[in-house]
Amino acid sequence: MILFRKSFSFLLIVFLLTTLIMVLPAFARGSDEAGSRRAAITLKDNFDREITLGSAAMTVVSLSPGITETVFALGYGNRLLGRTDYCDYPPEAASVLSVGSLTEPDIETIVALNPDIVIASTHFPKEALDRLVAAGENVAVLMGQESFQGAYDGVIRPVSLILGDSEAGEALVASMEATVDKALAAVAGFTRTPSVYYVVGFGEGGDWTAGGNTFISEMIEMAGGKNIAADISGWSFSLEAIVDGNPDLILLPGWAEPIFKTTPVYSDLRAVKEGHAIVIDENAIVRQGPRLAEGFADLVNAIGSVN
């Protein structure tokens, strides 16, 4: 009986020590994470404004589809109090209250929600910024940069910092980089550089595409193509230039496909006649956020189809 008690006591001590060894590191990690959430956060936005939060933002209003996607991808969709009408991904975003459009957010609704921070991006009007700041709201405008890297440095990393979880931001960036590296390995096997035209808009309203100073043009070049609009800046192009360029591949948003392919002049382009006017998910390309790597992989596949 004495031997049994001694053995039992010894085993109990071993069990307790093992449990402590397992629990203490997890407790330390939890303490570190809690500490990062409590630490003050300071960053500069694209208007060169310094924004300081006393701690990680626990409630957020997103005024950009790319920002909304990023918040969800980082695992913090539950912190979103509001989003725009255009924030349609992931599907869970639909359950978040809409606070208006990109260019006309409902200021009164946003102020009533009283978020820790409002995060805006491209197309956000300066007047809306001024009104929100005047109402005492913290606002960060993160427009990314006109480069693929801008999705990492201008959107994902700052948003993860605001949420108090930079580790999640780095993990997301690493995952995206792995997707990009895999796609680049396919590009290395291409034997030619096809000419590419990316359709943003066309018809009576004019022809619009991604000029050479845009991150979309950079993506086309990275993906093994040659953007026929690389010599222009901005987004405005001309029908004459499209005809002269007569691209090997045309990339279309879904809404444009049936009209573009049957409209005179466009329908006579080589890519249309040869079946190389391809629909691509424009939102995965134009939004600087977590799906940009997937969008790049789609570009590589499209360009590879005419290689």
Image: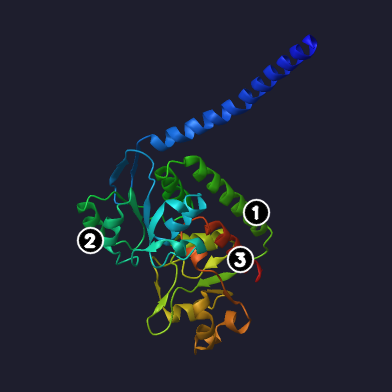
| Disc 2 to disc 1: CB gap under 8 Å | no
Residue at image location 42% in from the left, 48% down from the top: 159
Visible in this render: residue 144? no
- Name the residue type under label 1: Lys
Q: Which residue is mark 2?
A: 127
In front here: 252 or 129? Answer: 129
Say which element carries label 2: helix
Residue at 46% from the left image edge and 66% from the top image edge: 88
- Taking depth in this image into account, of 98 and 223 the one nearest to the observer is 98
Residue located beneath label 3 in the image: 193
Numbered disc 3: secondary structure: loop
Instruction: Using the image, tell me which numbered label, if any, was put on residue 182.
Output: 1
Nearest-to-viewer mark from 2 and 1: 2
Mark 3 and mark 2: Cα distance apart in space: 44 Å
Work out how far the residue at label 2 is from the one at label 1, CA to CA, in angstroms: 43 Å
Q: Amino acid at mark 2?
A: Glu
Quarter of the image with the C terminus is: bottom right
Three-letter amino acid code at the position of disc 3: Thr
Residue 215, image x and y in percent?
Answer: 46, 59
Q: Are marks 1 and 3 in contact (CB under 8 Å)?
A: no
The location of residue 156, given as percent across then percent down, is: 46, 49
What is the distance, in whole Å, between disc 1 and disc 3 at their CAs?
A: 19 Å
- Please state if 260 lies on the left or on the right of 114 as rendered: right
**Identity of the residue furthest to the left in this view:** 134
Q: Is residue 109 left or right of residue 255?
A: left
Please, which residue is most extreme toward the front here?
Answer: 1
* SS type, badge 1: helix
Q: Earlier in the sequence, mark 1 or mark 3?
A: 1
| Among the 4 quarters of the image, the one containing residue 12 | top right
- Looking at marks 2 and 1 on the same chain, the residue that comes earlier in the sequence is marked by 2
